[in-house]
Image (spheres, rainbow, N blue to C red):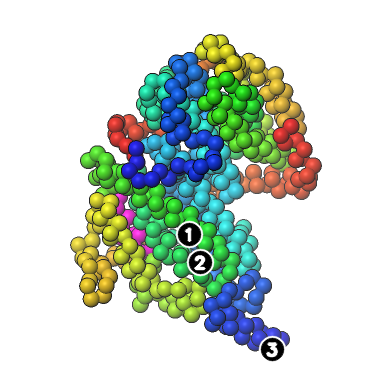
Amino acid sequence: MTDQVHSGQEYFEHLIDQDSRVEPRDWMPDAYRKTLVRQVSQHAHSEIIGMQPEANWISRAPSLKRKAILMAKVQDEAGHGLYLYSAAETLGTPRDELNQQLLDGRAKYSSIFNYPARTWADIGAIGWLVDGAAICNQVPLCRASYGPYGRAMVRICKEESFHQRQGWEILYELSHGTEAQHQMAQDAVDRFYGPALQMFGPPDADSPNSQQSMAWKIKRFSNDDLRQRFVDMIVPQAEALGLTLPDPDLAWNEERGHYDYGELDWDEFFAVLKGQGPCNKQRMQRRREAHREGQWVREAAAAYAAKTSRTATSALIGA
Amino acid sequence: MASTESATTQSAGTAITPEDIAARGVKADEDIARYALMLGDDSLILAQRLGHWISRAPELEEDVALGNIALDLLGHARFFLTYAGTAWDRSEDDLAYFRDEEQFRSCRLVEQENGDFGRTIARQLIFSYYQYELYRRLANSSDATLAAIAAKALKEVQYHQDHATQWSLRLGHGTEESARRLQEGFDVLWPYVGELFEDVEPIAALGNRAVAPSSLREDTMGRIVSALEEAGMTVPDAKPAYGSDRTGRFSEQRGYILAEMQVLARQHPGATW
């Protein structure tokens, strides 16, 4: 027994050293499994809760083309949630249990979704900044050491880059539209800039779990490195949009070869994380409500599945 | 319109897009345009209704499925409205966002509130069966644009039928509660079914360019009744509701639907998005 564990551990370490992939049936340390279940399910929960601020604007999208794009985007997010729950399930925790953790408030989701989408321009800012930050975070995850997670991320990243582009396009149109539209775009960027930068998590010095995740090659870059990469990416994009970023300290640093940026409001970040955001209660209430109101439907589907086999009914279709 | 490349432009090989219809240069005459508006408004309003389920469905798979159906219907609406607009030099958005309640031509069935999942499925069953029979025939229209739209829509509506049929069976034969809720859905909606088959204007003037709704009644109702029976439902004994035409005696819900859908566009008339 001891030998087996030992050889399992050796093989695991070998895989990590070789930059190879750990697969569901491979031995892995309990802490590695636990970290992954937490991270992957939090990511899935973020996709699901993140549908709400955008779904809020489907009914009011200002053109039919924008309505179609937004519907497709929110639908993609439900799809991302599904792949990620499936990836988490390969680690041995069923989707129902993960969902229950979300509903009970035991699991977290990305705090950014506790901010409201007040105007149509917020849909642009969410696409450009929030999805943009998510992409910076997620592209390195395509190489995460756990196979099913990395592979799910490949597909998710492709769709996210499309989402970011549509956000950019919304803001571009607004910025170059009427004065009122331009102002709407600027206000949205002013509100989402800080929270988007905080999506990478606290500064490295305050992020104790990051080291272990990097050693396991789940995470490839530190929070601050990713944040820097994001800032460097969005500054020229903001210029192209004709919009400003609300940070007086933002300046090119020749020596570092990067943009310097100002201190973020971490008190607000931690307060929102703990439940004080503008929409924390509302987001959870809506999720719980959908779950509760869907209970009878799921029960009916389960009862039907128990009563009959699928093949018997398919003859009815396309009659 | 947009200065950047359109995110919805589809690659070559796809049958038809709203942009294609606008670019074709075919101008619909007034009668065809009024007919296309009627078809487009039905799909637009139902897409608006179904879109509300996204992020609220009983399970994630249904967020995806209902979202997909809404997206298909919105696509069909965009084709029809774009085509209708060629008669009056108006865009799909002019027609969707800047017509008032009395100018819409949607039927009352699609305007009804979603209710619970049972009622939504009941409406999907009735409406997807109706659209299937309609598009199957309209694909042979002598109007080439309508025929092309119908041929494309038909493929998608087949899936909508499948989705509604499968859920009707699950709810109808699932639990006592699910059967009761599905039955209530059919009971509430049944008075608005008859309207689908009325030969309103300008159908008579269109000849074989359109499909007369009355010609769909027998096949459509036959199949709907069979589906109800398969699901263990009782066919409601309800007479058609009065006021049943598409020309102005519309439901109370229509005003709310349009108020929400049009609010932002109307705050910024003339703006592009």
Mark 1 or mark 2, earlier in chain: 2
Find residue A120 and report its image quarter: top left
Find residue A55 and report its image quarter: top left
Residue B88 in the image: state x and y as whole percent: 38, 20
| Point 64% across, 27% down: residue | B136
Mark 3 or mark 1, earlier in chain: 3
Q: Indicate which label's residue lies in the foreground, 3 or 2.
A: 2
Q: Is residue A190 magenta?
A: yes
B22 relative position to B219: left or right = left
Residue B94 in the image: state x and y as whole percent: 37, 28
Residue A207 in the image: state x and y as whole percent: 40, 74
The chain identifier of the residue carrying mark 2 reads A
Q: Crowding near pointer 2: few (<14 within 10 Å), some, many (20+)?
A: many
| Point 22% across, 72% down: residue | A254
Q: CA distance from mark 3 to mark 2?
A: 33 Å
The chain identifier of the residue carrying mark 3 reads A
Of residues A265 and B162, the one drawn nearer to the viewer in this rendering: B162
Which amino acid type is marked by label 3? Asp
Q: Are marks 1 and 2 in contact (CB under 8 Å)?
A: yes
Magenta region? A187-199
Q: Tell me the residue that label 2 is attached to.
A: A142
Q: Secondary structure at mark 1?
A: helix
Q: Tell me the residue that label 3 is attached to.
A: A3
B208 relative position to B37: left or right = right
Q: Secondary structure at mark 2?
A: helix
Q: Tell me the residue that label 1 is attached to.
A: A157
Residue B209 in the image: state x and y as whole percent: 56, 18
Mark 3 or mark 2, earlier in chain: 3
User: Which residue is farthest bottom?
Assistant: A3
The secondary structure that most of the magenta stretch takes on is helix
